Image (cartoon, helix red, strand yellow):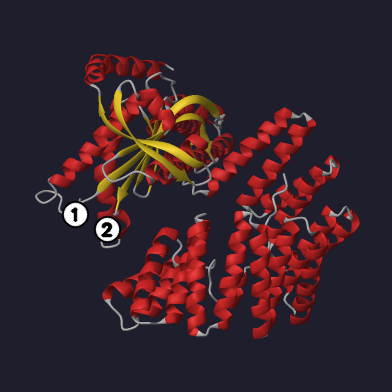
Amino acid sequence: MLKAYSLTIGLFCILGISVYAQDQKQADSLILIYEKGTNNDLEVLKQIAEYETDPQKAIIYSDILITKALKEASNQYAHSGYLQKGYHLQSLGNYTEALKAFFKSEEQAVLAGDELGKSAVLISIADTYSEMGNSKNAKSYYKRGLREVREINDSMVLATTLLNAGDEYLKTKQYDSALIYFEESGLIFKELNVPIGLAYNYGNSGMVYAEQGKDELAEKRISEAIDILKKLEDYSPISVYLNYMSDIYFRKNKLDKAFSYAEQSLGLAERYNLKKQISEAHLQLSELNKNRGDYKNAFNNYENFVLYRDSINNLETVQEMARLRTDYEVSQKQVQLDLVEQQRKTQKAVLIGIAIALLLIAILAIGLFRRNKFISRTKAIIEKEKNRSEKLLLNILPKDTAMELRDSGKVVAKKFDSVSVLFGDFVGFTSYSERLSPEEVVDSVDFYFSKFDEIVEKYGLEKIKTLGDCYMCAGGLPFPSQDHAQRIVMAAFEMTEFVRSSKARSEIEYKELNFDLKIGINSGPVVAGVVGTKKFAYDIWGDTVNIASRMESHSEPGKINISEKTCELIDRDFECEYRGEFEVKNKGFMKMYFVKKANEDYLRKFKELSSNKMQTEHSLANNI
């Protein structure tokens, strides 16, 4: 289960090409400059391709740069265009096309006489082959790149390239060769006084020694790396190194040391809120506990792994709920302060009454009467606020979840074996929203999402959340049902029809509503629960959710794209068109289908039964 983490410095950041340190705001401003027109199109396009964080958009601008550069016979800019295209294709896992782009970039660098650019391309090709697992080609290009780098006599680039090459030999278990590269790069980093390079050099050397069974030397080297990284306050690689050491000792069946390193990694990651490292440490502990036979803790660790993995992909909080909850807490605290103040006044009145005898007993009686009246009013206010809070809570969470949160202050996550998840996303919304004020953007989103909420309620589904212009809902929870897939597809048809009809009459009523809607649906098991303790939200997690999102991204405007699992649930009731197999990130190739229409028999049956069925379920939900 060796993970072979890549902890090298990032050669091209040192070269100044900024592959990984991209700045989306700068990219957006450069795009505006380009669209308005400039006398320096090639340079602006080059910078957009470098800074744009969306790989798909970056590839588009790289292609524009390549076309213009070739037309103007600018080999240098053509080299940059192909190089950036290769980087972004590599980030998408499209290694074959990335290599094609890098080879083109090398040709243009040679024509431009750019030796530094040529060496950068050679090392990028080596890195790509390394990612593909083609160690033979990776080593060959690292050697070629090293020859080029040595000729241009750039010590920093040389040290970084040596570190990258050594990492490749580490991954292929050629430990002696790896150490030779690490030793040379370490000497250069030490001479140049580059602490970060030295730290990674020590860390990677420690991994080699650990693989060779030289545990004492391995721990010494990794400790030296960690000491430097602590001074640099670079905690992420420390956590990764510790987890890597745990992995190595796990393979050697030294479970006590494996647990120790994994727990250190988790503790450090939690201290500095490094979500990716927290996720990986929990996965490592899950494997260790499973190996030990402690299935309860193994399951808990795996749940945390999934939770943190999903939170990395961008998890949002329910802002309005936080505000309402804060208002309620403030109102309660104010009532308590008022009660304390009133009690102080009453006690003072009692003391005065005792001092001046019978005359002030009457005043005390009046004070007590007012106090009782105040308490009655206060209780009424508290009860009113309590009812208001519960109603607001029910508008945000499912009823059983809201009641559980109210009664115990927390919600236990629940697993549902079969649900259907829908993602809907508007095509072209981002560029459209840039032309409007925030108020106009909110009005546009509210126009559609308010209707979507009505449709979701109509079909007995559960709205999960909205993310910008993306709408997410699910069927089959919190109350399991047999026909959740059919319901969610019917809702999807109604959503697309509403968007289509709105667009059709936009010339008269809604001049700016010219969107198309893409929808993706997947079915399978999920875990549902509430995230957080203050700014909380009802959410669902699992591969079913991730695949549903991928179905939406592979859909087309105005179409409903579903997975094979969903198709199996609805194929008797709906006409589905097989699209073929598409490559899905982290999942390989998956079969996809467009839903064309509902069968006539199903439509008749649905119209007869759905109304009574939804009313019955709604009644049951209100009685829980």
Under mark 2, the amino acid is: Tyr
**Helix, strand or loop for disc 2:** helix
Name the foreground residue: 377 vs 16. 16
Under mark 1, the amino acid is: Glu
> So how many labels did they put on this image?
2
- Which comes sooner in the sequence, label 1 or label 2? 2
The location of residue 368, given as percent across then percent down, is: 48, 30
Spatial CA span between label 1 and label 2? 9 Å
Work out whether 412 lies above or below 232.
above
Residue 588's mark?
Answer: none
| Residue at 52 percent of width and 33 percent of height | 529
Task: Look at the image and tell me whether residue 600 can be seen.
Answer: yes
For label 2, count other residues whose C-alpha is less than 10 Å away and answer few (under 14), some (14-19) or many (20+). Answer: some
**Helix, strand or loop for disc 1:** loop
The N terminus lies in which quarter of the figure? top right
Task: Look at the image and tell me whether residue 338 can be seen.
Answer: no
**Pointer 1 with pointer 2, Cβ within 8 A:** yes
Q: Which residue is tagged 1?
A: 512
| Residue at 41 percent of width and 19 percent of height | 481
The location of residue 421, given as percent across then percent down, is: 41, 33
The C terminus lies in which quarter of the figure? top left
Name the foreground residue: 44 vs 406. 44
Name the foreground residue: 572 vs 298. 572
Q: Which residue is tagged 2?
A: 432
The location of residue 108, given as percent across then percent down, is: 47, 77
